[in-house]
Structure formats: structure tokens, C-alpha cells
Image (tube, coloured by chain):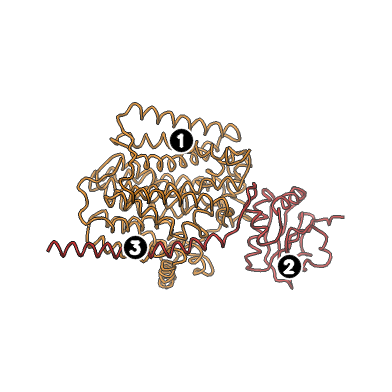
């Protein structure tokens, strides 16, 4: 009886050993692959925002650039951010610019490209400091401004000379 | 100067604050395990600093707030040293008994080193940066307190203005020491939670199995859970889910010690850690609720109804305190959830099957969990079959009930596509109970006869 108990105990632990080895093997493979999918950072104060700007908008040193622009706009009114509806680039760039521009008021407008011009022209220019276009072609008359990255464009009101 | 040097100062102050609090909580224990002391020093330290900055920040700003919280940390550390010198407790640092335990301990050191290395190579994730760190940045720029205008800023609702400030206040603390917002050096705090999790799992696994090698083995598994180690939401990305999972494990561990030894030390520590869960993340209310349900039952059976009721109060105070604060701040954030009413429940009841299906799909995603959620049901079956005990049942409840409640809460999701809401957040909810699942594996590996007197150190 005792022998049977011992055999059973040994089988039990052998089975668990197999399961745990499989666990480690699968896990090790995924951990090895995992970090390669994430964004590498440098040791700078804006390590993560810079990494996002560079990875998704091809804008090196994007945080400092964005901060410099926002400093010029601060106190002159709200900023309106235009992007196509439901795009992750629109969400990400709005969040990054909004993150960096505190306490600047910034509102997001999701708009179809066909409706963009009408929406921009209907803005109250006296209370708007700038408009930002993400993945949208700026309408005629709104092409003088500062590019912040790939298809990310800031147009101040009034336009810079 | 390398900003990691002052950031390390911030970490040391957190440990100092937590050391005093830990010794205070463990003052009646005959001996204190060094691993437990380190883990509790970190967890209590983070709580002292985050609560301290939040509460003192209502009246103080800038350097005076920094100095005030530093004084609290020093005072706590000195109190701890005095208690330790006056008391008769012994510090207990177990050494590996054989080559296998030494090998497992070395592996843990290697894994921790890899996690530290990777943490400083990878950016903060979306939530890490745009939900948690953003609050820390705005708080630091405002002298240490999150500006009142932030809570009513509808253009920044993407950052979940209603989320509690445990992690942001810790990050603000690091910024006080580095002198500026620094997205690089702030990453230092996250691998420390990982270390705390590994140490605690080793300790709890040893206590539950009665064998130190099993504790060390299960602690090693921590590294091989891909979602925990390297996925979005894991330890590298600066999310709150790894910290909350570690605190949940710690609270559960001390509840299990109380259940076994009827120790007042364990009871007080459990209550304090459990009450802090809603302060770490909104989802912490679910984890706190589950612990409270189990805790009240266990405390009632051992010490009567009054201590059981009293054990609930700290958590209620934390939840109510935060809600009062949000009302004072004129919060204007649309919720992710509909009002929890019977008509909503009935009308959305058909969501239950798709949500459960997604939970099963997530649990069996090896890219996230390796074989963890395949092994966990096997471990629980083994536990129930070999060692049917109250604490095994409590472990089962504390591992599964939060997931069941989380699934039920999705019935009230206000997202237009509720399945997107589930897919988006469910993996992180699963992560919160993953350390308990690992503890079930440790228990299943234990020899059939549990030792009469368990070798818990404290």
C-alpha cells in the first residue's frame, strides 16, 4: 500500500515537473520575443514622449519641439486639434500634445477630410491660438505653420510671417 | 548628475518610511523574516509617501511639502529602529540549504537584473505615461498637488482624471528628488515592485508548501509570465497593475497567516494592505471587496463580529475619502460604466456569455500567460483533492471571484463596443490575480502532509 502511495507521489511530481518545464519553455520564448516589440528609450527627461514621437511621427526630439511651440501659443487662446475619426495616431498625437501643453486648453475634433475646411473656417479666430492637423491635409490658407512630425502640422492664428 | 542618483534617494526614503511602519505592524511577531520586512517596507513606504504627499499637499506646496514628507519618512525610520532595538524580535535571514536552492536564488537575481535592464530600455506604455505619469507631471509642476483645474478639464478625460493618486504621487516624489519631471528615472520604481512581488511569492510559496525550494521555484515562474514581464501592462510599462497585484498578494498572504495562526500582527497588516487597494487603482475596489468578504468570514469565526466589522472600516474610509475629494475638485469625467441598476443588468445580461468567452480566450493566450492559466485549474484540483482546507478554499475564492466580478462589471460598460472595452482592459485584470494563481501552484507542489507548525518566519 505504502509502495503504491510512493509510486503515485513520484508520478504526481514528475507530471508537475513536465508541466513546469513546459511553462518555462513557452514563457521564456515569449519573454525573449516580447521586449523586441516595444519602443526603446534614451536616458532623457522626455524619454517616453520622445520615443513615441520618433516611432510613430518620425519626429526626433519631438517633446522639446512641441513644448517650444506651446510656449509661443500659451495665453493666446485655445488650441483645436483636428484628426480623422477613430484613428490611433489621432488619439496618440492628441494625448501627447495635450500632455505636454498643460495648462493650455486643447480640444479634439474628429472630422472627415471632406468636412475639414468648413470646420476650420467656422472657428472663432479671436479665441483660438492655433489649429493642429493630424493625418489631414491642411486647407488652403492654413499651410503656414510648424510641422511637428510626419503628417502632424501646427498652424498658429495669426499665421507666422 | 545622473538623475538615477537622486531617484535612488527617493526610493531609499520610501523604504525608510515603510521600515518604520512595517516594524510597527510587526512589533508583536517573535521574529521577522528579512524578506517580509523588505517587501512590507516597500509597500508601506509607498503608501506613507503617496498618502503623505496627497494629504499634506492640500496645505503645503513645493519645498515645504518635500521637506514635510521627508521629515515623516525620517521620523518613521527612527521610530522603527527604536522599536526594533527595544523589542525582543529577531531578524531572520534564511540561507539556501542546498545547491538547488542556491541555484534558484541565483536565477531570481539574474531575472531581477534583466527586468531592471529592460525597464530602462523600454518606454512607459500608454497608461503608464498618459494616465499615471501625466498626473505626476502636473502635480510636480503645481508644487506637489494635482491642480484642481485638471479634474474639471474635459479635454484631458483620456487620462482618467478620476483615478486615484497612489502611483502619480510616488512619481511626484521621485520628481521632488530629481528636481524635474524625468520620464527616465521614474522608471526606477516599477522593477522594485517586481522585486517585492518575487520576494513575497518566495516567502508565501515557502509558507504554503512548507518547502523553501518550492517557494523559490514558484518565485522564478514570475519571470516567465510574459504579460507580467514584458507586455503592455506589465512591469516595464509603468502601469498600476503589477503594484496592485503585489499588494493584493501581500494582503492575501497576511490574511492566510491570520487564518492559520490567529495572529493580531497578521490581521492588522492584512487590514492595512487590503484597505490600500482602492487607493492604487479603481479596480482595487473589487479586490478589496473580495478580501473583505473572506476576511470578515475568517475574523468573525475567530474573534467575533466586532473585529470583523472594524476590519472593513479602513477600506471604506479610503474609498469614501477619495470620492469626497473628487467631488470637492468638481470632477467632470464621464464614467466608463452605466449606473448599476437592475434594469441595466437585465437589459445587458446577454453580454455575459461573450464576456466569459473573452475571459477564457485571454486566459488561454500563451503569448500573455504561458501555461499559467492551464496550470492553475490543475493546481486547484490537486489542492482540493490532496489538501482540502479552509485556506485552499480562500485561495480559490480570492483568485477566481475578482475575475468573475470583473466580468460581471462589464455588463454595465458604457462603451459603444463593450467587447472592445473587455479586450482592452481584461488582460490587466487577469494580471492582478496572477500571483495568487502562482501561489496555488506552490501549494499543489507541496508534500501531501502539511507540516504541523509552518515555517513562516514572522
Query: Which residue position holds label 3?
Result: B376
Callout 1 secondary element: helix
Left or right of residue B411: residue B213:
left
Residue at point 55% right, 48% down? B187
In this view, the residue farthest toward the left is A1
Query: Label 2 crowding class (10 Å Cα cut-off): few <14, some 14-19, many 20+?
Result: some
Could you say which quadrant of the image residue A84 lies in? Answer: bottom right
Q: Which residue sits at x=26%, y=60%? A: B383
Question: In the rendered view, does B34 fall on the left or right side of A134?
Answer: left
| In front: label 3 or label 1 | 3
Label 2 vs label 3: CA separation? 49 Å
Tell me the number on the disc at residue A136. Answer: 2
Between label 1 and label 2, give the one nearer the viewer. Answer: 1
In space, the residues marked 1 and 2 are separated at their CA atoms by 52 Å
Query: Chain ID for label 3?
Result: B
**Image spot of residue B182 (x, y percent):** 62, 45
Which circle, 2 or 3, is nearer the viewer?
3
Q: Is residue B406 above or below residue B108?
A: below
Q: Looking at the figure, which quarter contains the N terminus of chain A?
A: bottom left
Quadrant of the rendered image containing residue B328:
top right
Write down which chain is painted orange: B
Which chain is indicated by disc 1?
B
Judged from the image, the secondary structure of the residue bearing numbered disc 2 is loop
Disc number for residue B17: 1
Q: How much space separates mark 3 and mark 1, taking CA atoms?
A: 36 Å
Disc sitting over residue B352 in the figure: none
User: In the drawing, does residue B35 fall left or right of residue A149?
Assistant: left
Q: Position of residue B88 (x, y in %)?
A: 29, 29
Q: Is residue B43 visible?
A: yes
What letter labels the chain drawn in red?
Answer: A
Q: Is residue B43 above or below residue B223?
A: above
Question: As displayed, is residue A64 above or below residue B3?
Answer: below
Amino acid at each position: 500500500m505504502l509502495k503504491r502511495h510512493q509510486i503515485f507521489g513520484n508520478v504526481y511530481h514528475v507530471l508537475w515537473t513536465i508541466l513546469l518545464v513546459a511553462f518555462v519553455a513557452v514563457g521564456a520564448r515569449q519573454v525573449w520575443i516580447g521586449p523586441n516589440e516595444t519602443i526603446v528609450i534614451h536616458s532623457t527627461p522626455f524619454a517616453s514622449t520622445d520615443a513615441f514621437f520618433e516611432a510613430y511621427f518620425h519626429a526626433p526630439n519631438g517633446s522639446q519641439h512641441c513644448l517650444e511651440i506651446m510656449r509661443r501659443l500659451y495665453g493666446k487662446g485655445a488650441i483645436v486639434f483636428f484628426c480623422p475619426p477613430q484613428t490611433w495616431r489621432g488619439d496618440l498625437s492628441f494625448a501627447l500634445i495635450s500632455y505636454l501643453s498643460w495648462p493650455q486648453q486643447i480640444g479634439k475634433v474628429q472630422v472627415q477630410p471632406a468636412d475639414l475646411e468648413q470646420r476650420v473656417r467656422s472657428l472663432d479666430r479671436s479665441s483660438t491660438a492655433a489649429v493642429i492637423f493630424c493625418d489631414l491635409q491642411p486647407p488652403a490658407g492654413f499651410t503656414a505653420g510648424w510641422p511637428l512630425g510626419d503628417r502632424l502640422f501646427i498652424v498658429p492664428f495669426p499665421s507666422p510671417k | 548628475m545622473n538623475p538615477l542618483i537622486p531617484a535612488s534617494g527617493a526610493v531609499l526614503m520610501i523604504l525608510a518610511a515603510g521600515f518604520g511602519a512595517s516594524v510597527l505592524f510587526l512589533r508583536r511577531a517573535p521574529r521577522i523574516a528579512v524578506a517580509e520586512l523588505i517587501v512590507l517596507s516597500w509597500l508601506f513606504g509607498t503608501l506613507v509617501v503617496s498618502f503623505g504627499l496627497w494629504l499634506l499637499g492640500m496645505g503645503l506646496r513645493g519645498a515645504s511639502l518635500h521637506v514635510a514628507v521627508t521629515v515623516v519618512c525620517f521620523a518613521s525610520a527612527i521610530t522603527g529602529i527604536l522599536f526594533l532595538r527595544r523589542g525582543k524580535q529577531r531578524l531572520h535571514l534564511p540561507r539556501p540549504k542546498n545547491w538547488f536552492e542556491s541555484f534558484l536564488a541565483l536565477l531570481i537575481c539574474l531575472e531581477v537584473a534583466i527586468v531592471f535592464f529592460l525597464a530602462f530600455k523600454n518606454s512607459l506604455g500608454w497608461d503608464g505615461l498618459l494616465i499615471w505619469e501625466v498626473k505626476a507631471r502636473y502635480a510636480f509642476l503645481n508644487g506637489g498637488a494635482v491642480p484642481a483645474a485638471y479634474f474639471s478639464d474635459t479635454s484631458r478625460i483620456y487620462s482618467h482624471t478620476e483615478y486615484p493618486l497612489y502611483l502619480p504621487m510616488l512619481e511626484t516624489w521621485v520628481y521632488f528628488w530629481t528636481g524635474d519631471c524625468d520620464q527616465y528615472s521614474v522608471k526606477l520604481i516599477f522593477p522594485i515592485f517586481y522585486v517585492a512581488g518575487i520576494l513575497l511569492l518566495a516567502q508565501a510559496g515557502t509558507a504554503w508548501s512548507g518547502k523553501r525550494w518550492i517557494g523559490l521555484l514558484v518565485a522564478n515562474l514570475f519571470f516567465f509570465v510574459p504579460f507580467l514581464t514584458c507586455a503592455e501592462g506589465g512591469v516595464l510599462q509603468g502601469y498600476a497593475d503589477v503594484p496592485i497585484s503585489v499588494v493584493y498578494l501581500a494582503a492575501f498572504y497576511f490574511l492566510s497567516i491570520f487564518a492559520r495562526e490567529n495572529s493580531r500582527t497578521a490581521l492588522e497588516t492584512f487590514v492595512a494592505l487590503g484597505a490600500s487597494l482602492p487607493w492604487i487603482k479603481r479596480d482595487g475596489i473589487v479586490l478589496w471587496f473580495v478580501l473583505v468578504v473572506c476576511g470578515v468570514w475568517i475574523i468573525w469565526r475567530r474573534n467575533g463580529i466586532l473585529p470583523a466589522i472594524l476590519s472593513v472600516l479602513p477600506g471604506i474610509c479610503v474609498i469614501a475619502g477619495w470620492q469626497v475629494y473628487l467631488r470637492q475638485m468638481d470632477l467632470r469625467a464621464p464614467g466608463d460604466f452605466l449606473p448599476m441598476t437592475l434594469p441595466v443588468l437585465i437589459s445587458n445580461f446577454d453580454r455575459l456569455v461573450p464576456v466569459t468567452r473573452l475571459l477564457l480566450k485571454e486566459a488561454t493566450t500563451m503569448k500573455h500567460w504561458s501555461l499559467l492559466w492551464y496550470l492553475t485549474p490543475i493546481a486547484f484540483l490537486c489542492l482540493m483533492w490532496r489538501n482540502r482546507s479552509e485556506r485552499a478554499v480562500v485561495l480559490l475564492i480570492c483568485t477566481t471571484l475578482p475575475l468573475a466580478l470583473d466580468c460581471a462589471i462589464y455588463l454595465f460598460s458604457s462603451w459603444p463596443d463593450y467587447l472592445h472595452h473587455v479586450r482592452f482592459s481584461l488582460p490587466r485584470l487577469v494580471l492582478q490575480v496572477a500571483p495568487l494563481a502562482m501561489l496555488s501552484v506552490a501549494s499543489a507542489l507541496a508534500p501531501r502532509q502539511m507540516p504541523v507548525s509552518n515555517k513562516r518566519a514572522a
